[in-house]
Image: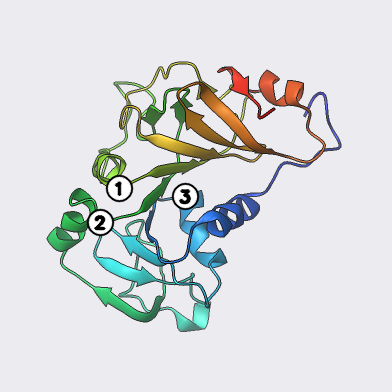
Amino acid sequence: MDTAVDIKPWSRAQMAARVARDVPEGWYVNLGIGIPTQVADHVPPEREVIIHSENGVLGMGPAPAKEDIDPWLINAGKQHVTLRTGGAFVHHADSFAMIRGGHLDLCVLGAFEVAENGDIANWATSENDTAPAVGGAMDLAAGAKRLWVVMEHTTKDGRPKLVRRSSYPLTAPRAVKRVYTNLAVLDVTDRGFVVLDILPGLSRDDLQARTEAKLHFPS
């Protein structure tokens, strides 16, 4: 960081652990590909958080050790997973009926950009992008009761990913309720982004300098 070179951003594992800490007991949660998948690794065994995967798994556990891999048990991102006690396999159509029927308390996705009004863009960076398809992200963003995003605060070249208005093809409009980055945790409100937590040692001005959208801070 240019103004705070001694400050180390939260790692992806720390970001995932923070999301896991904030998920209430008893919620049904879908985890998207990328950083969100790691959330399952940080849910304590004694907590009842039921993790869903759109390919037809309900009750996913953390990633398995190499010697415990079941080649037939994968999530939607084709990563090997485990099944918690009481978990189940369902038909792909039944899995999407859960999503579209509003039965998921939360979906956690990654994103390329999130706008201050809650717009999310997470599948393509232009109309000519080579991404094969949006996948189940549109269903999840529209069907889950709430949507959280976990992502890096800026791109590799330092461009802000929290913006006033997204320039990318949208996955869903006004869907995001909260954003977790490697620098802060923010709620999406009628005022825009409200900062709930900030990386220790990082000033408000430093955070704003890395954010295109205006930030609001609790009094």
x, y (%) of residue 73?
33, 73
Label 2 and label 3: CA atoms lie apart by: 23 Å
x, y (%) of residue 145?
32, 47
- Residue at 31% across, 40% down: 141
- Residue 161 in view: no
The amino acid on which the numbered mark 2 sits, given as a three-letter code, is His
- Tally of marks: 3
Q: Is residue 114 left or right of residue 107?
A: right
Tell me the colour scheme of the image: rainbow
Secondary structure of the residue carrying numbered label 1:
loop
Q: Which residue is mark 1?
A: 144
Which quadrant of the figure has residue 173?
top left
x, y (%) of residue 102?
23, 50
The amino acid on which the numbered mark 3 sits, given as a three-letter code, is Gly
Q: Which residue is mark 2?
A: 103
Q: Name the N-terminal-most of marks 2 and 1.
A: 2
Judge whether 190 appears above or below 6 on screen.
above
x, y (%) of residue 27?
39, 61
Secondary structure of the residue carrying numbered label 2:
loop
Q: Which residue is mark 3?
A: 34
- Residue at 42% across, 19% down: 166
Instruction: Give the mark toward the camera: 2 or 3.
Output: 2
Label 1 and label 3: CA atoms lie apart by: 19 Å
- Residue at 70% across, 26% down: 207
Q: Name the N-terminal-most of marks 2 and 3.
A: 3
Query: Which one is nearer the viewer's eye here, 219 or 104?
Result: 219
- Residue at 40% across, 63% down: 79
